[in-house]
Every structure is written in C-alpha cells, then in structure tokens.
Image: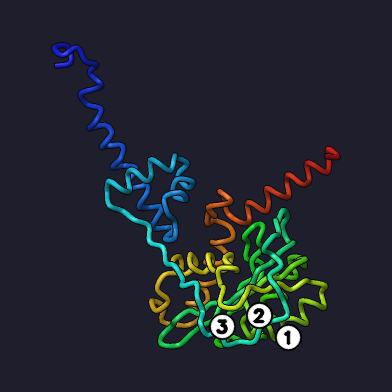
Amino acid sequence: MAKLFGLRRSNLYYASKQKSKDAKFLVEIKKTMEANPSYGSPRIALALGVNHKRVERVMKANQIKAFRRRRKHFKPDDLKQDETKYSNQLKNLCVVAPRAVYATDFTYIDYQGKFLYLATVIDVFSREIVGWDISDRHTADMMKRALEMAFKEGVPVYLHSDQGSEMKSEIYTNLAESNGVKISMSQKASPWQNGFQESFYSGFKLDLGDPNRFELKGELIEAIIQNLNYYNNDRIHTSLKTSPSNYFKQYEIKKTKLLKTGN
C-alpha cells in the first residue's frame, strides 16, 4: 500500500504506535496522580519530565481531570471584629530570601464528628512549612507553639496572618514583637491576602485524603505529620518547579558560590 500510494511505510502505522505510547503514558499519569492527589497537569509534567501540553492532551483524550478544592474567600463573621492596629505589610513587598517573611494560619480537620486543628507557619520565599502544631482546640497557645518551632529555623523580619483572634492575642503578638518581628495582617474578611496559607491547606487536605479512614486519632496525627514532610521534601510546588526544601537548598548553594567568588 505504501508503494502504491507513494507514501512512507511509517505513515501507515504511526497512529497505532502513537496510541500505544499514549496508553503507556496514561499509566504513568495515573500513577503520578495516585501518589500525588493534588497534582494538576503542570506538576504531573514536571514530575514526569515532559512537556505539559502532552500531559494535557492525554488527560483530555481520556477525560481525566485533576480535582482541586477551592476554599471560599469570604468570611462574613470577620466583619464583626474590631479592626486591628496591624496593617498588611506584604502588599508591596518582594521576598527575595528565605527566613525573611513568614505567614501563619490554622485549619480544621473534621474527624469522627469532631475537629482537629492544624496550625502552620510557612516561609513565603521557599514555601517550606517551618513550624506547626496540632491541637484539639484552636487557641493562642497553639499558634505560639507553631511560632516557637518556626523561630528555631530562623527569626523573620515580617510575620503575616489574617485577623483571627488567636493572631491578635497578646500571647501571639508579644512573642513576635519580643523577637523583633514586624507583624503584618490581612484586611478583615480578606483571606486571599494570606493566599500562601490558603493555597497550602487546599492542596494539603487533598493529599491527606479522608481523615475518617483512620480508626485512631493518633494514626491521623501521624498521617498529618507524614504529609507535612511530604509537602516540604517531595511535593513539587508549581511556581518553584521543585519541592520547597530543595528550592531552599538550591538557594543556599547559589549563595555560597556567590560568596566564594565575591560577587
């Protein structure tokens, strides 16, 4: 047939070969999504070392969509609170180094009809979780413990959060200010101004999965800690193109080289 129509033989079996390649590639995509539930096509492509358009094409052809939970960006109850004296210091700030700006918040995890609370402190530059605490109650002490862990990694110049009562408490503000840290807070009912934490919790809960699959609370706590380690060390961050801890290491290596060369 190829000789009859003056075509290359490869033209006649290309489609079947492409389908075979796509079928094998689909298996790799599914494996990556199973291991990383919060990954969309850009991060799947980074994980597999391929062009994101190829991933998008195969996912679309097989009607596969990445699931992404979006939190509502409006908290009407916050409007009832008194305005804080702390303004948003990060609006016009460009963060160019690690351990300079931290952002903090907490989220709840629904477990067997009760809530378990997770407080986290994130390095805005590297996106690393540098401090955390797990508690049955969302209190100022929970935030304090998370901050104390984070300050062991380095004391930042700025500490950002929303206007939650825990962050406006004397326990929280005194700890920050006694360490010379400048406090920054989002405007009322504006959680998107702390998008670093909002985005983290959205992906974290997808990666954690259904908390109620665990029989014991201790098993859930262990899974939370494992997922925090996974986020820091293995999970690819879209804007960083690598994991937070690896991004931090790359920065430190570049910094050391520059110091040695005197640039």
| Chain-order first, disc 2 or disc 1 | 2
Pointer 2 with pointer 1, Cβ within 8 A: yes
The residue drawn where x is 63% and y is 79% is 163
| Quadrant for the C terminus in the image | top right
The residue drawn where x is 50% and y is 75% is 74
Q: Which residue is mark 1?
A: 171
Figure check: 78 above or below 254:
below
Residue 134 pos. (x, y %): 58, 79
Q: Nearer the viewer, mark 2 or mark 3?
A: 3
Label 1 – label 3 distance at C-alpha: 20 Å
Q: Which residue is more in the foreground, 61 or 26?
A: 61
Q: Secondary structure at mark 3?
A: helix
Figure check: 167 above or below 193:
below
Q: Which residue is mark 2?
A: 143
Q: Nearer the viewer, mark 1 or mark 3?
A: 3
Residue 18 visible in the picture: yes
Q: Secondary structure at mark 1?
A: helix
Residue 133 pos. (x, y %): 62, 77
Where on the picture, by quarter, is residue 55?
A: top left
| Quadrant for the N terminus in the image | top left
Residue 18 pos. (x, y %): 28, 34
Classify mark 3: residues with Cα within 10 Å, few (<14), some (14-19) or many (20+). some
Q: Inspect the image, locate mark 2, and give the three-letter code of the amino acid beneath it.
A: Met
Q: Which residue is mark 3?
A: 78
| Chain-order first, disc 1 or disc 3 | 3
